[in-house]
Amino acid sequence: MRNKKRIYKKNRDKPDSLSIAYQYGRAFPPLAPSGDPPRTDVVPPDLLSTDVLLSGHVHSDPSPIGLKMSVLKRRTATLVAHESSFLAPASVSCRTRHFSLFSRPSPQYPGHVPLNVLERGALAFGSAFGALMNPRRADLIAACGEATATPYFIYRLRDAMLSDPTGRQILRERPRMTSTTLPLPYLRSLPENSVGWTYAAWLDREGVSPDTRDNVQYIDDEECAYVMQRYRECHDFYHALTGLPTFVEGELALKALEFLNTLIPMTGLSMAAAVRLKPAERERLVSLWLPWAVRSGLSSKELINVYWEKILDKDVDELRGELGIERPPDMREIRRMIREQKKREKQKLEQQQAA
């Protein structure tokens, strides 16, 4: 008799699976007879414990499913209000992984590298300093551009594309610029002074390939990452449109134009590389190229909305007029003339000394 009392007391104190389900906020409809098979069309199976499914204690009302769900919602609300009066608050722990140095969210697209605020700041400072020391490090310039473009500037550029019909088409189709999508033999066969022919001629003159652009890694939003990739791949078309070369003086002139057109911080930060120019080059940058960049950058349309692949046969002078970009003086020709003048002056000085 004493053993039977112990067993009864033990079973009485042991909570059943339904009580456990109530404690964790899982409200169920009234129980069905124990002989009925379990019904899972009322309560989602993932909310049912194994014990309840095996016991068959699930509501088996044959009313339509829409009515069942509405009834379930009302019962759940009533049950929660009733439980709050006599039950302790349920401590449901929703394990969210906080973003930190040791816990990272999953990448949003292939090649994505998520960064926190400290890492993004360190990347921006380190890549900017490295690019200043060596302006030909395209990978550092690209990293600086991505680290400083968020959270505002790349979204502004994305919104500029969304507000334009051509920009929206580019975002829908997401074309990529490579030597496969833009074959150089085809571009060279286009009419002279067309956009495609001018682009191919500039690539040949500068020894550049469309395949040299790095993929975006450090921008979290997948659509904004494509916008940055698009800007990066269109950069050579800006070179071809303006005729500016790839050495530091030409890059700085083009970056000044891009900053006023796109507002990407990296393009403005690039102007710090002017300290590496020779005094004559720095004087030309201030007196000639920056005024041109200000005039063209403030008056030009959004260059990110140009669908270059669809206007390859268009006359490049006509396109400059439509975009509001003034053609700058030929930088290579100016530098060649200056070199020849210095050479003549040197020869003249040597002749005077020999006489």
Image: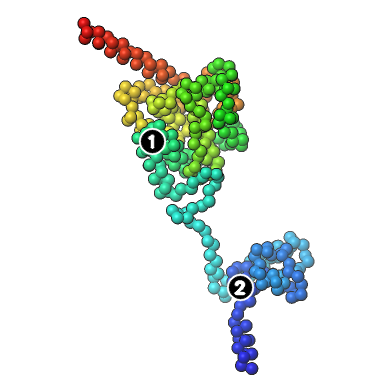
Q: Nearer the viewer, mark 1 or mark 2?
A: 1
Query: Residue 107: image x %, image y %?
Result: 53, 48
The CA distance from mark 1 to mark 2 is 61 Å
Residue at x 57%, y 36% (from the top left corner): 162
The single residue placed furthest to the right in the displayed view is: 62
Q: Is residue 341 left or right of residue 238?
A: left
Q: Residues within 10 Å of mark 2 (few under 14, many from 20)?
A: few
The single residue placed furthest to the top in the displayed view is: 355
Query: Helix, strand, or loop for circle 2?
Result: helix
Q: Is residue 62 left or right of residue 142?
A: right
The earlier-in-sequence mark between 1 and 2 is: 2
The single residue placed furthest to the bottom in the displayed view is: 1
Residue at x 75%, y 61% (from the top left corner): 65
* Depicted 240 relative to depicted 158: above or below: above
Query: Residue 349: image x %, image y %?
Result: 25, 11
Quadrant, the N terminus: bottom right
Query: Residue 103: image x %, image y %?
Result: 47, 55
> Residue 20's mark?
2
Residue at x 45%, y 55% (from the top left corner): 102
Query: Helix, strand, or loop for circle 1?
Result: helix
Report which quarter residue 195 is drawn in.
Answer: top right
Which residue type carries mark 1?
Ala
Residue at x 37%, y 18% (from the top left corner): 335
Q: Nearer the viewer, residue 164 or 141?
A: 141
Which residue type carries mark 2?
Ile
Q: Nearer the viewer, residue 182 or 207?
A: 207
Quadrant, the C terminus: top left
* Depicted 115 relative to depicted 235: above or below: below
Which residue is identified by label 1?
A: 131
Report which quarter residue 49 is drawn in.
Answer: bottom right
